[in-house]
Image (cartoon, grey):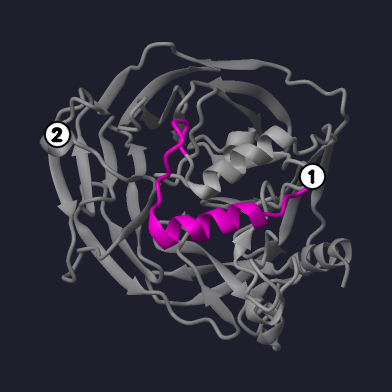
Amino acid sequence: MSRGKRRAAVIALMAVPGTVGAQAKPVQPRAVTYPITATAPARWTVGTRPLLEIGGADGIGPTELTKITGVTRQVDGTIVVANGETGELRFFDTRGRFVRATAGRGGGPGELEYLTRMFAVDDTLLVVDGRIKAHVYAPNGKWMRSLVLPAIPGYLRNPGVGALGPFDVVLPLRGGGSDERRFDPRRNDKIRMDSIWFGRVSVRDSSARVLLGQPWAPSFALAPGRPAAYAVGFAPRTLIAATRDRICTGYPERYEVLCTDTIGRHTLRIVRDTPRRAVTDSARRVYRDNQAGRRSDGTSRFAGDLRKHRERVAAATQFAHYFPAYSELLFARTGELWVRAFAPADGMLSRPTPYYTQAGRSTWSIYGRDGKWLADCTLPARFGLAEVGADYVIGISFDEDDVERVTLLSLRR
C-alpha cells in the first residue's frame, strides 16, 4: 500500500473506534481551514522576568532538580514537580519554598520504579510509572490508587502520554488488526509506515478502550536484512494532547490537527495551508553530528565500539524531504489548544526531559474549542512548556550547562 493510501486508511478508521470488540457511532466533524495568507489575529506575550524559579545551578537538597518529567501549578498556587531522578513528587509553595515530597523510588504502595510522566487533572495527579504502571495521587500528594495497565489484545502498550481524567490514562498502542506480523519491523528492511493507536485505560477499574489511529513515523534499517530500527531524520512524529473532554492528534507532514471526543468520535479538524520547508544540507549535517555524538570541539560523547556504531548510524541516516509542519500539541487549563511551530532543533533525537527546548525561541499558535485561531505566542529560548493557565505559563528552563530549573512566567492575553 502506498504511503498516501495507508495514511488515508488509518485516518478513515478514526471514525469507527470503540471498546475492544465494539464500535462507536460516527459523528460529522467540524472542519476549519486557514489559507496560506492567514495570520494570527492577536499576539499573546509572556513576561520577560520570571515570577518564580525553582532549582537551577544554585539548587540544593529538594530544590536540586534532575530529569524533570512533569510540572503543574495548582489552584492555590502550589507547584508540584515530578523529579525523575529520585522518583519524587516535590511540592513548593507560592514563593518556591519546599513543602513536602511524596512517592519516591520503591515497590511499595504509592512508590515508583521509574517516574516517566506526571499529568494534572483538576490538581489530582496521574503518574506514569515505567511502561505499564499508573498511579493516582490526591492534590496534597497522598497516594490513592495504582494499576498495572491491562493487556489489550492485538496491541503493544507504550507509556502513557496524557490523561482524560484523574483515573483515565491515554497511552499509545502499536499494532492493530488481526495480522500483527505486518507491524513487525524485523520483517521489513525498507522505510516503513506503520500505525499507532491511542487508547484509554481506567486506573479505577482497568477497563480499556481503543480510541483512534494515526500514521507512525518511518524508520530505516542500518543494513539490508536488519530491523528498521532507526528514525528517519526530520520525519513527522505522531503527536497527541488530551484533556477532560477531548483528544487532539496529528501526524504533521502537513498542518492538520484532528480532534475527537472521549470515546474517539471525530469532532473537529483544523487545517492550515502552510509553506513546505525542504530539509537543508546544513540541517542534515547537524542531525548526523547529533546522531554520532560529535561535539563542537571535535570530541565525541561515545567511546570504543559504541562510537563506531553511532558513526555508522549517522552515515546511513535517511531523511524526510520536508520538515514537519509543527512539533507539539498541548491543552491549556483554560481549554485552548496550543500548537508549536516546528524548528529544525525539534528534530534532534536526544532530549533530557519530555519537554521540547531549543537554543532559539519557540512560537505557538492557539486555537479555541471551535478551531478558531485566537493568537500566536512566542516563548523564551531554552524553555520547555509544561502547562498554560489563565495568566501564566510554567515549564522547564535550561542554562548553558543544561542544568534544569522550573520557571513560572506571566501570560498576557
In this orientation, does residue 369 appear?
no
The verdict on residue 304 being magenta is yes
- Secondary structure of the residue carrying tag 2 is strand
Up/down of 166 relative to 367, above or below: below
Tell me which segment is drawn in magenta.
Answer: 295-321
Q: Which residue is mark 2?
A: 98
Name the residue rendered at 27%, 67% in the picture.
145
Residue 338 drawn at (x, y percent): 60, 35
Pick the front one: 216 or 233: 233
Q: Quadrant of the N terminus?
A: bottom right
Label located before the other in sequence (1 or 2): 2
Would residue 48 be found to the left or right of residue 142 on screen?
right
Marks 1 and 2 sit apart, C-alpha to C-alpha, by 44 Å
Name the amino acid, label 1. Answer: Arg
Name the residue rendered at 46%, 35% in the picture.
298
Residue 148 drawn at (x, y percent): 35, 75
